[in-house]
Image (spheres, grey):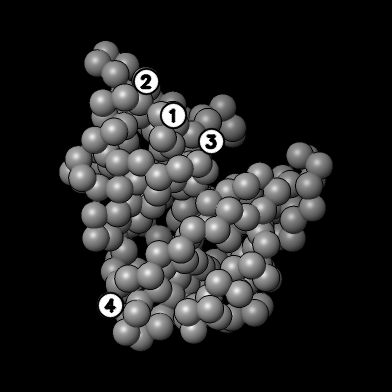
Amino acid sequence: MIVKLLVVGPIQANCYILGCERTKQAAVIDPGGDVNQILMALAKDELRLVYIINTHGHFDHTGGNRALKAATGAEILIHRADAPYILNQGASAAAWGMGVENSPPPDRYLDEGDTITFGDISLEVLHTPGHSPGGIALVTDKMVFVGDTLFAGSIGRTDFPGGDYDGLIRGVRTKIFTLGDDVVVYPGHGPKTTVAQEKQYNPFFAEGG
């Protein structure tokens, strides 16, 4: 499997490209902006984009949806609870002094237990609300792409509308930490980490935390 990390958009979000080496089908997780950079990275490995997957609906992770879909025809996938955010992300970005186009409507809604398949790659969907109501994580081959649910040494903010601190902590404990200590965690911002590292050192999950 091809895995590429691009840091994109006005708030430097992590955008991931996953590609099947055999079929050249690909998915992009969280295209927050800089769509030309994403397209060049796809072209470098001759990848054909099938899916645009949003781990949640905040504009710094979804700002490139419209341009990327227009360029590739890929389907936009997101949890139903966060779909309203992407349809109004222009106003959300403007409130932060940034310009972002509204996303087209999703082509498919994702929920707990769904599987996204392209080429030889399958991603299992976990619903991990807390940072936002429709936050999801994507699991494959000892890797989990967690959006803004979990960071190296920290967690996503829960003070935005729809945030739920207790729900986020519970979701990480019951759905992410149970995947196995050797699973590599790919967050929405910052460096990758591992489940073992976060269980041991993340201050939000210390004993009694």
Secondary structure of residue under mark 2: helix
Secondary structure of residue under mark 1: strand
Looking at the picture, tell me which residue is in the foreground, 107 or 95. Answer: 95
Query: Mark 1 Cα within 10 Å, few/some/many (few <14, many 20+)?
Result: some
Amino acid carrying mark 1 in the image: Ser
Amino acid carrying mark 4 in the image: Asp
In percent of the image, x 78 and y 47: which residue is there? 98
Circle 3 residue: 162
Disc number lying in front (3 or 4): 4
- Precedes in sequence: disc 1 or disc 2: 1
Looking at the picture, tell me which residue is in the foreground, 67 or 134. Answer: 67
Circle 4 residue: 120
Amino acid carrying mark 3 in the image: Gly
Q: Relative to 11, does residue 209 appear above or below in the rendering?
A: above
Residues under numbered marks 3 and 1 in contact, where contact means CB atoms less than 8 Å apart: no
Secondary structure of residue under mark 3: loop
In percent of the image, x 66 and y 44: which residue is there? 11
Residues under numbered marks 1 and 2 in contact, where contact means CB atoms less than 8 Å apart: yes
> Furthest residue to the front?
44
Circle 1 residue: 154
- Precedes in sequence: disc 2 or disc 3: 3
In percent of the image, x 43 and y 36: which residue is there? 151
x and y percentages locating residue 88 in the rendered image: 69, 53
Disc number lying in front (3 or 1): 1
Q: Is residue 135 visible?
A: no
